Image (cartoon, rainbow, N blue to C red):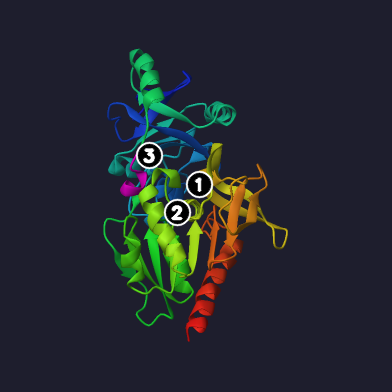
């Protein structure tokens, strides 16, 4: 801890800081992104959608309520590195079981602190998301710039998906929902179970025929890292699932997967939407909701999927945040509905999904 380290961006910008967490393992490299959440750092640390990324917290003090395993959103930390202005070494919280430094050490993730995170965030906002490399010596900086320029990450979904299929919820549940785990945060299982479903979580590369053979009442395409364009194999299976007529709900990467499967275009956002304070407008009622988001891509407004209409738009940049499919029992959103970071108003989207399954079941009788 307290070893001087350097974050080197592919455009040549260099930020000097000090290390905490795990020791640097050579050239720690990833896509550098920022998140604007004032709380929820435990959810950020354990969100599989950050797989392969170096995450910058814009809020200046991180770790003040400690380490709370019951608030984790997945089985481990997927970040390449974690950057904060200041981290709290003595958290105060009756639920705390330690400091984030301990967690990062256990997970093998390097942390940097003492950087000018405000300037770093401005650089990323003005120039867009960039690759970055963490090095320990000034003499390594020139080489780090070149490595960052050449860096390209693959296999994010394969790393983030569950290693084996499993079931949660009561055998007496009214509905059986299959979740295609693209890098899921655990809260979505809980939301479905609370609404009367048993969830069957399957690996992202499970074939559509195998899923449909189990006769699910509904299918949830989960959140996850990266873009649907990087996973054509999964998109092809999602197309089969959509054409089956089984009710589908897509979230985050699942939203992109469904859009790609139905012929929609995907664009990369300049610096993405990451944080728990992203405003979205629900077009059917013209109501505004504050949402939690973590993504760098969006469905193109100029190339919407066939038979889909926009339901949500981002109020900051006008990008697509939700779709309803007219000829399919399917809906999807780019943000995290009904999340556990304080904003639960959009939980009604899960209710809409359950209603789709109810209608489908009644039609089959």
Residue lying farthest to the right in this orientation:
286
Image coordinates for residue 147, horizontal then vertical, percent = 35, 22
Q: Is 146 or 93 nearer to us in this picture? A: 146
Q: Residues within 10 Å of mark 3 (few under 14, many from 20)?
A: many
**Secondary element type, mark 2:** loop
Q: CA distance from mark 1 to mark 2?
A: 9 Å
**Secondary element type, mark 3:** loop
Q: Which residue is mark 3?
A: 52
The magenta stretch spans residue 158: yes
Q: Which residue is mark 1?
A: 294
The magenta stretch spans residue 124: no
The quadrant the N terminus occupies is top left
Mark found first going from the N terminus, 1 or 2: 2
The total of numbered circles placed on residues is: 3
Residue at 27%, 30% (x, y): give it. Answer: 25
Q: Residues within 10 Å of mark 1 (few under 14, many from 20)?
A: many
Q: Which residues are magenta?
A: 154-159
Left or right position of 328 against 154: right
Image coordinates for residue 153, horizontal then vertical, percent = 36, 36
**Secondary element type, mark 1:** strand
Give the vertical position of 27 relative to 296 (above or below): above
Residue at 38%, 83% (x, y): give it. Answer: 172
User: Disc 1 vs disc 3: Cβ atoms closer than 8 Å?
Assistant: no
Residue lying farthest to the bottom in this orientation:
365
Give the vertical position of 50 relative to 150 (above or below): below
Q: Residues within 10 Å of mark 2 (few under 14, many from 20)?
A: many
Q: Which residue is mark 2?
A: 223
Residue at 36%, 33% (x, y): give it. Answer: 20
User: Disc 1 vs disc 2: Cβ atoms closer than 8 Å?
Assistant: yes
Q: Is residue 344 visible?
A: no
Mark found first going from the N terminus, 1 or 3: 3
């Amino acid at each position: 801890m307290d070893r001087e380290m350097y974050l080197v961006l592919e455009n040549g910008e260099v930020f000097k800081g000090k290390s905490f967490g795990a020791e640097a393992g050579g050239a720690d490299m990833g896509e550098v992104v920022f998140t604007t959440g004032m709380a929820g750092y435990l959810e950020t640390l354990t969100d599989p959608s950050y797989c392969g990324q170096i995450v910058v917290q814009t809020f200046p003090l991180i770790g003040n309520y400690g380490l709370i395993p019951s608030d984790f959103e997945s089985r481990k930390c997927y970040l390449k590195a974690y950057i904060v202005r200041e981290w709290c070494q003595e958290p105060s919280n009756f639920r705390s079981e330690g400091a984030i430094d301990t967690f990062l050490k256990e997970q093998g993730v390097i942390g940097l602190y003492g950087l000018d995170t405000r300037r770093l965030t401005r650089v990323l906002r003005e120039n867009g998301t960039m690759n970055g490399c963490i090095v320990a010596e000034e003499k390594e900086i020139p080489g780090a710039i070149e490595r960052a320029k050449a860096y390209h990450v693959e296999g994010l979904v394969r790393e983030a998906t569950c290693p084996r299929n499993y079931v949660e919820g009561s055998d007496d549940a009214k509905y059986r929902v299959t979740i295609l785990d693209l890098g899921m945060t655990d809260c979505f299982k809980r939301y479905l179970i609370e609404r009367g479903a048993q969830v069957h979580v399957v690996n992202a590369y499970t074939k559509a025929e195998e899923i449909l053979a189990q006769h699910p009442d509904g299918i949830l395409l989960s959140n996850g890292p990266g873009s649907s364009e990087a996973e054509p194999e999964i998109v092809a299976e999602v197309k089969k699932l959509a054409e089956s007529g089984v009710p589908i709900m897509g979230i985050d990467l699942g939203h992109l997967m469904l859009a790609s499967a139905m012929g929609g275009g995907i664009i990369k956002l300049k610096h993405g939407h990451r944080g728990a304070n992203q405003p979205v407008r629900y077009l059917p009622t013209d109501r505004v909701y504050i949402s939690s988001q973590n993504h760098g891509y969006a469905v193109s407004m100029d190339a919407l999927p066939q038979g889909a209409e926009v339901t949500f738009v981002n109020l900051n940049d006008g990008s697509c945040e939700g779709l309803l499919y007219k000829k399919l029992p399917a809906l999807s959103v780019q943000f995290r509905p009904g999340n556990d970071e304080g904003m639960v108003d959009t939980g009604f989207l899960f209710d809409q999904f359950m209603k789709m399954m109810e209608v489908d079941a009644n039609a089959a009788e």
